Amino acid sequence: MRRCAISIIVLLLALPLIIQFGYADDAQPTEYQLKAAYLYHFAQFVNWPAAAFAQTNSPLVIGVLGDNPFGADLERTVEGKVLDGHPLKVQEFKSFSDITGTCHILFISSSEKKRFSQISEKLAGKSTLTVGESDRFIEAGGMIQFVLAGGRIRFEINRTAASKAGLTMSFKLLNLASKVQ
């Protein structure tokens, strides 16, 4: 009986250490869980023209073009969320020709880097916020580029490209960017 009590006390004293060292890495969000959260927050701080939605309750579509690095993380992040009466919806597109309807935010995977200029031309005049992580994405006309700086995920903004698409970014979003062009 005494040995059992001692074992329980030792286990209770060791529990914080087990949690801290054994599970701390598991509790850290992955790179793409963080980027999924960023995409959701971008939706909160960007305004689309009314014409970008067929109806006042049409979904706000977040698309992933090319290889999907998020897995199910992006869908889990936006599941059940509604912004300004628009339920959030995630769609995957293997190629640009698969995009047949409206896409409000388009994450362009690194797998599409070679085709970005063609994609950019086809998106001209559409109110689609383009987000990518490829080098020189915003210099090539993308609107938001994820960058790694000091081991942290940051983002840069091409405000001119967003304005040409009829999108308005809040000052809060612009202030959070590590660089605004």
Image (cartoon, grey):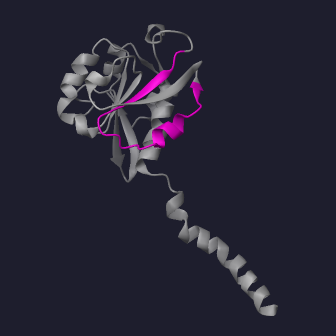
Q: Is-magenta flag for residue 60?
A: yes
- At 37% from the left and 20% from the top, the residue drawn is 128
In this view, the residue farthest toward the bottom is: 2
Within the magenta stretch, is there residue 106? no
Q: As displayed, is residue 146 above or below residue 30?
A: above
Where is residue 33? Give x, y as percent: 46, 45
Quarter the N terminus occupies: bottom right
Q: Which of 20 and 8 is in front in this view?
A: 8
- Residue 55: x %, y % from top left: 52, 9
Q: Position of residue 138 (x, y in %)?
A: 28, 30
Locate the C terminus and report the quarter of the image it occupies: top left
Between 162 and 127, the one nearer to me in the picture: 127
Residue at (36, 20) in percent of width and height: 162
Q: How many labels does the image show?
A: 0
Q: Which residue is drawn at 30% across and 37% down?
A: 109
Q: Quadrant of residue 159?
A: top left
Q: Where is residue 59 in the image (x, y as percent from the top left)?
A: 51, 20
Task: Say which quarter of the image contains residue 107.
Answer: top left
Residue positioned 26% across, 29% down in the render: 95
Instruction: Report if residue 134 is visible in the image.
Output: no
Say whether residue 177 is visible.
yes
- Would residue 20 be found to the left or right of residue 107 on screen? right
Vertical comparison of 102 with 74: above or below: above
Residue 93, compared with residue 163, is above or below; it is: below
Q: In this view, does 110 lie above or below 9?
A: above
Find the residue positioned furthest to the right: 1
4 sits left or right of 28 in the view: right
- Quadrant of the rendered image containing residue 105: top left
| Horizontal side of residue 124 vs 29, given as left or right | left
Magenta segment = 58-82
